[in-house]
């Protein structure tokens, strides 16, 4: 196959050589035998001699191959994961990729840089790159609506000496989007600020009461009793907050590891309900459990799932109606088990629904006397996601709420 290809590629050389041989036959009566032999040598030689073997000794060894002509600049730009624009030395656009077009919809070839970026730092950076011909400098750049924070690397990619050709890409602009990274950093520092604030409030109250007990209320037995009660509650609140923070960070650390044990949701729900029965009784709330008639086995970590359903049932009691009801139901849906915790309590408005699982998020208008850490649903969300499950939330103000956790079944008989 290769031989035929070579022959085809060298067809004009072969025709020329054979033409010369046969013109000698016709013009000078060259005998037929050498003419035929010569033609055969030309054809077989063209078919079987590789070019490299002819030139191997004479051509110098190449250290690296040049980029294949099949790799165009546009395909390189297309393969880059960030917006890139190439300018010529006068600052006119010569090439750009689709991501750059997404960022600057008005971008087009031959447009001047100032037509799509007016930021003086960027314009100055480009002027400097042109003057100094230095490879890298980084400039910060911000867009409005949608608000994005970028870092632009401006690099001179033209010749370092001599005259740079006109209308050729000599300056590269590489845009690195910092928006998400900065949002994450802000979230982290918000979290630390929130956590310390949540701890500081009860701590300040405990310290205040200690001072009062040491001073003004030293000999007041009645006040001492009352203050100690408040201090105990505040200390419990701090302990709960620390427990929740530790649970959350433990779950986050293992977020990428899916649990391997097999657990039965029926058993977990029964355990949770039994342990929360006394809490529900205090508010006169009845707990109703409808387990699956068959085993509801999922891949999961028993303690973590106990915490998930405890948090949900505790919330249903806490934000439920006194003398109300909480229904805990397990159903099989295809290859999943859906466990829902429903209450007939105060509910919350739709605008809160997607934010409830954020750390420290609380719906102010439905709190009243109830105080939580604001971390319960964040723990639920992270645990469910570690279990590769789904959490659905629905509610109507004044009617109640339903929190449903769907987990993949390991095995079940879909008779419900
Ligand atoms: P908290 O410790 O404050 O209960 P969570 O993360 O468990 O924290 O819940 C966040 C917020 O979601 C609560 O402060 C409350 O406003 C709202 N919420 C949670 N569960 C319910 C529910 N069953 N009914 C109404 N509101 C709820």
Image (cartoon, helix red, strand yellow):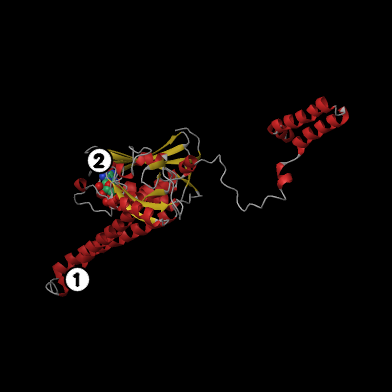
In space, the residues marked 2 and 1 are separated at their CA atoms by 41 Å
Depicted 291 relative to depicted 215: above or below? above
Res 177 label = none
Q: Residues within 10 Å of mark 1 (few under 14, many from 20)?
A: some
Name the residue located 18 percent from the left edge and 68 percent from the top edge: 209
Residue holding disc 1: 210
Name the residue located 50 percent from the left edge and 35 percent from the top edge: 413
Report helix, strand or loop for mark 2: helix
Q: Does residue 280 show up?
A: no
* Residue at far top of view: 26
* Residue at far front of view: 28
Tally of marks: 2
Q: Position of residue 235 (x, y in %)?
A: 26, 64
Q: Earlier in the sequence, mark 2 or mark 1?
A: 1
Where the N terminus falls, by quadrant?
A: top right
Eye-nearest disc, 2 or 1: 2
For residue 179, side relative to residue 45 (left or right): left
Q: Does residue 339 show up?
A: yes
For residue 89, side relative to residue 121 (left or right): right
Depicted 353 relative to depicted 205: above or below? above
Q: Toward the viewer: 188 or 136?
A: 136
Q: Position of residue 13 (x, y in %)?
A: 71, 33
Depicted 335 relative to depicted 267: above or below? above
Can you tell which quarter of the image residue 38 is in?
Answer: top right
Can you tell which quarter of the image residue 228 is in?
Answer: bottom left
Residue holding disc 2: 351
For residue 342, side relative to residue 19 (left or right): left
Where the C terminus falls, by quadrant?
A: top left
Asked if ligand 1 lies within 8 A of label 1, the reply is no
* Residue at far left of view: 216
Depicted 342 relative to depicted 244: above or below? above
Can you tell which quarter of the image residue 6 is in?
Answer: top right
């Amino acid at each position: 196959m290769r031989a035929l290809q070579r022959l085809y590629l060298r067809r004009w050389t072969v025709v020329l050589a054979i033409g010369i041989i046969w013109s000698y036959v016709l013009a000078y009566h060259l005998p037929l035998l050498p003419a035929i032999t010569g033609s055969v040598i030309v054809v077989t030689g063209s078919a079987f001699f590789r070019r490299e073997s002819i030139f191997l000794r004479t051509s110098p060894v190449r250290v690296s191959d040049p980029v294949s002509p099949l790799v165009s600049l546009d395909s390189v730009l297309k393969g880059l994961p960030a917006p890139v624009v190439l300018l010529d030395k006068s600052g006119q656009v010569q090439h750009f990729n689709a991501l750059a077009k997404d960022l600057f919809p008005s971008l087009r070839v031959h447009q001047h840089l100032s037509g799509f970026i007016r930021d003086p730092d960027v314009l100055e950076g480009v002027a400097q790159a042109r003057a100094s011909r230095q490879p890298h400098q980084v400039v910060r750049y911000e867009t409005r609506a949608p608000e994005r924070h970028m870092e632009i690397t401006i690099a001179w990619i033209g010749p370092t000496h001599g005259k740079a050709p006109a209308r050729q890409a000599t300056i590269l602009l590489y845009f690195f989007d910092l928006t998400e990274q900065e949002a994450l950093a802000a979230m982290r520092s918000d979290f630390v600020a929130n956590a310390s604030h949540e701890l500081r409030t009860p701590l300040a109250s405990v310290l205040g009461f200690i001072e009062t007990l040491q001073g003004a209320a030293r000999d007041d037995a009645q006040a001492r009793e009352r203050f100690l009660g408040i201090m105990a509650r505040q200390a419990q609140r701090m302990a709960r907050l620390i427990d929740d923070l530790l649970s959350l960070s433990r779950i986050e650390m293992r977020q990428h590891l899916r649990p391997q044990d097999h657990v039965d949701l029926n058993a977990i729900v029964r355990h949770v309900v039994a342990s929360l029965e006394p809490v529900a009784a205090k508010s006169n709330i009845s707990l109703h459990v409808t387990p699956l008639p068959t085993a509801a086995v999922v891949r999961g970590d028993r303690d973590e799932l106990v915490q998930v359903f405890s948090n949900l049932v505790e919330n249903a009691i806490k934000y439920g109606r006194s003398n109300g009801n909480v229904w805990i139901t397990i159903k099989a849906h295809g290859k999943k088990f859906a466990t829902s915790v429903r209450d007939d309590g105060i509910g919350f408005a739709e605008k809160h629904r997607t934010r409830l699982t954020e750390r420290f998020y609380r719906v102010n208008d439905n709190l009243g006397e109830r105080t939580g850490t604001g971390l319960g649903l964040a723990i639920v969300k992270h645990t469910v996601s570690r279990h590769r499950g789904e959490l659905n939330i629905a509610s109507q103000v004044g009617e109640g709420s339903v929190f449903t956790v769907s987990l993949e079944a390991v095995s079940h008989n879909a008779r419900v």
